[in-house]
Each structure stands twice: as C-alpha cells, then as structure tokens.
Image (cartoon, grey):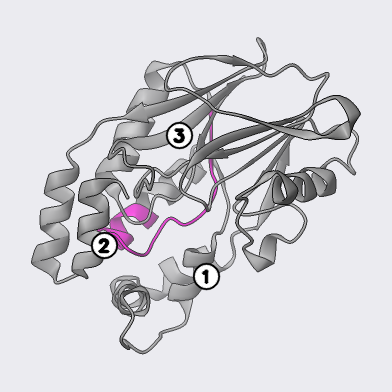
Amino acid sequence: MKLALLSDIHANLPALEACIAHANAQGADQFALLGDMVDYGPYPAETVERCRQLEQEGAIILRGNHDTCPTQESDADATWGNMTTSWTFKQLNQDQQAWLAQLPLTAIIDNVFLVHATADAPEKWHYIQDERLASRSLDAAAKNPEIRYVFGGHVHQQSLYYRGSGNRLMPFQPKNGIAIPVGTYRHWLATVGSVGQPRDGDTRANYALLDSETSQLTFHRVSYDYLTVAQTMHDLGLPEALITRLESGR
C-alpha cells in the first residue's frame, strides 16, 4: 500500500489539488487527510466539498483544531486568527459545518496511527516541536503493540523521529523526494508538513508518502500557483499577515 499523508490544507484548494495529482502520479492508492481542512485560506466551502469527495472514494479524514472552530461563530476581534475563523464560518453551510464537527480525531490503519496533533492528547492540540513531545506521542500510540508509525501535522513543518538504542528518540531531517527506509523493527513518528500554508521558508506544498511494501517514507514538496491564491485572499479582504505568510512560506 502507498499511503499519501496530507495535513493542514487550510482552505487552499489549488495546493490540495496539486498534492493529490502528485500523489496519484507516485502511485498512491490510499489517502489520509490529517485535519485542518479550513481556516486561513480563501476556498473553505470548495475545500470541504473536495475532501468529502475524497472520503467517498475511501480516504481517511481527521478533524483538526481549525476544523473545530468554524462550527461555532466567533467575533471578529483584533486578531487575524479570529477574523478568518469568523469569515470561514460564514462561507460554510450547516451541512458542511456538521460534517467537520463529526470527524474523528484519530484513526488506525494497519500498523499506522493517524492524528492531527499528538496521540497522547489529541483533543488538546499540542505541537510536536522537540524529541520530548514526540516521545510522549509515540509512547501513547505504541501502547498498541501493532503500531509502528505515528503520523500527524499541526506544526506545518516536515519532521521525522525514530526510536534509537536505549529507548531514546532520535530526530532525522527529511529531504524532498528522497525515500527514507523506515523498517518496522523500529517505531517512527513524523509530521508531514502543510499542504496549504508551509512555514519553513519554502512556498511549495508539503505531503508525505508511506510505501508499506518497501517500508519507505518519502517527503514531497509540490509547486502550485500560490501567487494567484494570495491575490484571491487579497481580493476577499483576508488579513495581510496571512497573505504575506503564503507568499514567503513563513
């Protein structure tokens, strides 16, 4: 099985379509979307409908923290985060809101644990930013002895950790398009990056592909027309801070 792992789409439909097309070209036969389909970006309703279509085709879809917020209208106060949440809420009909609200926080497929944030407390939306937090998440998932991989998003950056000697968790820096051997004799945890809003200085969309037959994990960067998306955000009056972030990849 080739499992395509996509997260943090953030209502950026062109980036999502680019990643889907790239994954299909790589031979992906299963998709998993790890949350945050909406907020920030200019195409919330269209993105939700595309994700629902993927679900009907067999994709696993999880709920992220930004998928939770738009189900309750918030006031547009001084922060651009609340401003986009309020705007996003108004773009979604009740059926779309209800679909987001009922999505699960975690899923298991074979020996893979899927989550938006962390396996130890998925509802608290912790960020995996170091070995300690990665170890806590991996330990929680590995209570199921069949689990060998934990995949999430939330941090908008690509990272990989593995359990080394002495039970210590070791970081490994992935490189674009280079397959990494991830044998099942070890435990692995990865954050797959962001499809719709990268934050590592590279404007290209992020996703990862697990080949369970060869036990290889490949992190991918995919080009798309982010400048047109940024212009659409500008035309809609979305916060300039988000537009700048999209244009800079930070």
Q: Residue at x 17, y 39 (%)?
A: 225
Q: Amino acid at mark 1?
A: Thr
The reply to whether callout 3 and callout 1 are in contact (CB within 8 Å) is: no
Q: Amino acid at mark 2?
A: Leu
The magenta stretch spans residue 120: no
Task: Report the mark closest to the observer, 3 or 1.
Answer: 3
Which of the labelled discs sits on residue 123, or is there none? none
* Image quarter of the N terminus: top right
The reply to whether callout 2 and callout 3 are in contact (CB within 8 Å) is: no
Estimate the x, y position of residue 194 in percent, counting from the top left.
42, 45
Query: Which residue matches tag 1?
Result: 68
Give the residue at the far top of this rendering. 214
Q: CA distance from mark 2 to mark 1?
A: 20 Å
Query: Which residue matches tag 2?
Result: 242
Q: Amino acid at mark 3?
A: Tyr
Q: Which residues are magenta?
A: 30-48
Query: Which residue matches tag 3?
Result: 207
Task: Report the mark closest to the observer, 2 or 3.
Answer: 2
Q: Foreground residue, 57 or 243?
A: 243
Give whichever of discs 2 and 3 has the lower sequence position: 3
Give whichever of discs 2 and 1 has the lower sequence position: 1
Give whichever of discs 3 and 1 has the lower sequence position: 1
Task: Report the mark closest to the observer, 2 or 1.
Answer: 2
Q: Answer few, some or many: residues within 10 Å of disc 1's Cα (few below 14, many 20 plus, some between 14 and 19).
A: some
Q: Examine the rendered structure and indicate whether residue 6 appears above or below residue 62.
A: above
- In the image, taking residue 117 as reference, residue 179 lies left or right, namely left
Secondary structure beneath label 3? strand
